[in-house]
Image (spheres, grey):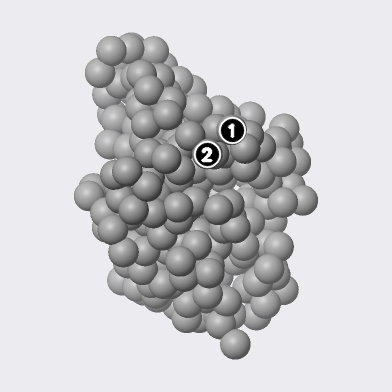
Amino acid sequence: MAIKFAYYPGCVVQSSAPEVDEAMRAIAPLLGIELIHIPGSSCCGEGVIRQANNDLQLALNARNFAIAEDSGLEILTSSASCYGNMWEDLSELNSDDELKQRINKVLARTSDMRFDGTTNMRHLLHVLVDEIGLDKIKSLVVNPIELPVAAYYGSNLLLPGSCGDDDPWDPTYFESLITALGGEPIYIDGRTQSVGHTSILSQEKTVLKMTAEILNEAISAGAKVLASACPFSSIALDNYQIKAGRATNTDTDIPVIHLPELIAFALGCYPERFAYLRTRVMVIGT
C-alpha cells in the first residue's frame, strides 16, 4: 500500500525548476509514495516575509497546514528551503497556544479555516531513509550512478529536531542515499552551509563568494556532480556558477542536479537525461 502525502512542490519548483516536479512524480509510484495535491496552497514565505511581519508568514503557512489537515495527511516537499521555513512555523505554532489562537482568528476572518496542529512537515530525503529504507531503494536501482557525487543539504534542512535520526551538525543521510543509488559519496564541509541566495539582489558579491566556495570545494574533493536537496539554493549553485567563478577566480564548473533527479536517473527514469549528465561530466573533466 502506498504512503500518501499532501504534496507541496514550492514556488521555485512550480516556476523555474519544473524538472524537480517531473522527477518527483516519476519516482513516487516506484517508491510506493502517492502524492496528493494540496488545493490552493500558497508560498511558504521563504523566511523573507517573516522579517517584515512574522504573523503574516505564520498565517500563510497555518493556512497551508489547515488545507493538509483537511485531507488527514502529512506534508511532503523536496525543497529544503520550504521544508525548513514551514517546519519552523509549524513548531512555533504548536508550542504557543496563545499564538495559535491569534493566527486562527486571522484564518477565520480571511479564509474561514482553522489550524489544529495535526499535520507534520516531511522532506523527501528523510522519508526515503526513515520510511522507504535504503535497502529497498538499492533494490530498485536500474542504472547505478557510478559517479563521485557531492551532496548539498542546505542549512534549512538541518534544523535541530527536524532531521529524523540524522545529525543536523554532521549529516549522513544524503551520502548514504548516494551509496544506495550506486554512486560514490563525496563529503564536503559546504554541504551544510547556506549560499545566501535570498540576498542575491542586495549582497551579490557575498552570495557569489559563498556559492563559489561550495562549488570549488566539491570539485577539489573529487566530485563530478553536485546533487542538491534545495531547489532554491540550486539557482545560485547552477545558474550563477560562471559568475561566481569569475568573481572569485576559482573553478566552479560542475554539473548541479536536484535530489529527485538523481533518484530518477538511478531508478531508470529519463535515461536520455542521465546520458546527457554523463556526457557533461566527461566534457568538463577533460
**Residue 179 position within the rendered picture, expressed as x and y whole percent measured from the top left:** 66, 60
User: Residue at the location (50% across, 81% down)?
Assistant: 30
- The answer to which image quadrant residue 159 occupies is top right
Note whether 10 is above or below 180 in the view shown. Answer: above
Residue type (three-letter) at the residue carrying disc 2: Gln
Residue at the spot of label 2 = 101
Gap in angstroms between the C-alphas marked 1 and 2: 5 Å
In-front residue for pair 163/51: 51
Q: Which residue is mark 1?
A: 98
Disc 1 to disc 2: CB gap under 8 Å = yes
Report whether 258 appears left or right of 4: left
Q: Is residue 8 above or below residue 154?
A: below
Q: How many residues crowd mark 2 within 10 Å: few (<14), some (14–19), many (20+)?
A: some
Q: Foreground residue, 165 or 195?
A: 165
Question: Quarter of the image holding residue 210?
Answer: top left
Q: Is residue 93 visible?
A: yes
Q: Position of residue 254 (x, y in %)?
A: 40, 40
Q: What residue do we see at 68% from left, 68% from top?
A: 131
Q: Label 1 sits on what residue type?
A: Glu
Q: Is residue 195 left or right of residue 142?
A: left
Q: Position of residue 117 (x, y in %)?
A: 58, 52
Q: Is residue 154 left or right of residue 67?
A: right
Q: Where residue 252 sits: x, y (%)? A: 39, 30
Q: Residues within 10 Å of mark 1 (few under 14, many from 20)?
A: few
Report the residue at 39% width, 13% height from top: 206
Q: Quadrant of the C terminus?
A: top left
Residue 280 in view (yes/no): no
Quarter of the image holding residue 45? top left
Q: Which mark is residue 62?
A: none
